[in-house]
Amino acid sequence: MNTTFQLKDGSPYTVRRAKEGDLEKLIQVLLEVARDDEFTSVTYPEAESQILASEERLKNLLQNEDEHFIYLIGLVDDEIIGFCDIHIGKKTRTKHVAEFGRSVVKKWRRTWAGKFLQLSAIEFVRNLKTIEKISLNISSNNTSSLKSCQSNGFKLEAGRKKEIRLGAQNYADLLTYVLYL
């Protein structure tokens, strides 16, 4: 899979499956997104330790092209500006379900990069022919992601109230959206 799109400003944008050679750049983008992202359920220090602790596992996943865990990356001029991690159920009763999350580096948000990652992930999963349902969790304060998933046919399935603490008395709900293929 190697698909090229055109971003809002006309820049060519390529989405492809991550490879072992992308590991270093991918780790840096994961850290950058974690540092700048107000829509995640973990703080930067928590995310940083999780990312760095899982570096070897991620390397193994990229080397072996694990069929249950796939990373798609979005590139502009060979620079990774976004990623989408796709998790496919391993157990007999869950292998018909894929779950994914996507993130884009802050300066590239609202350029359609996230939308194209999401479309590529849907297409990738659809081509597997074994997946019946795609789900993703979105913070209720992430309005652009909510609009994007709704415009791609995702429907609200469930929500967890006050799941993410944004401040002393400020919370966001965690919403689960699904798309049946």
Image: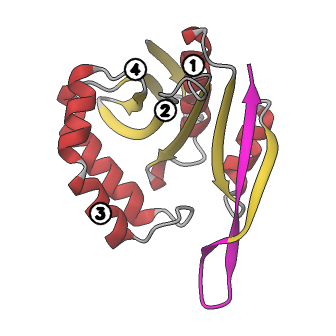
Residue holding disc 1: 125
Is mark 3 in CB contact (under 8 Å) with mark 1?
no
Name the N-terminal-most of marks 3 and 4: 3
Most frequent secondary structure within the magenta stretch: strand
Q: CA distance from mark 4 to mark 2?
A: 10 Å
Q: Left of 133 or right of it: where is 11?
A: left
**Residue range highlighted in magenta:** 163-181
Q: Is residue 174 in the magenta section?
A: yes
Which SS class for mark 4? loop
What residue appears at the point 46 percent right and 67 percent down from the top-left corner? 42
Which SS class for mark 3? helix
Which SS class for mark 2? strand
Name the N-terminal-most of marks 1 and 4: 4
What residue appears at the point 72 percent right and 61 percent down from the top-left corner? 140
| Position in image of residue 126 (x %, y %) | 62, 14
Q: How dense is the environment of label 1, judged by Cα within 10 Å: few (below 14), some, or many (20 and up)?
A: many
Above or below, 138 against 6 in this view is: below
Residue holding disc 3: 48
Q: CA distance from mark 1 to mark 4?
A: 11 Å
Name the N-terminal-most of marks 4 and 2: 4
Which SS class for mark 1? helix
What residue appears at the point 29 percent right and 29 percent down from the top-left corner? 78
Residue holding disc 4: 67
Is mark 2 in CB contact (under 8 Å) with mark 1?
yes
Q: Left of 172 or right of it: where is 54?
A: left
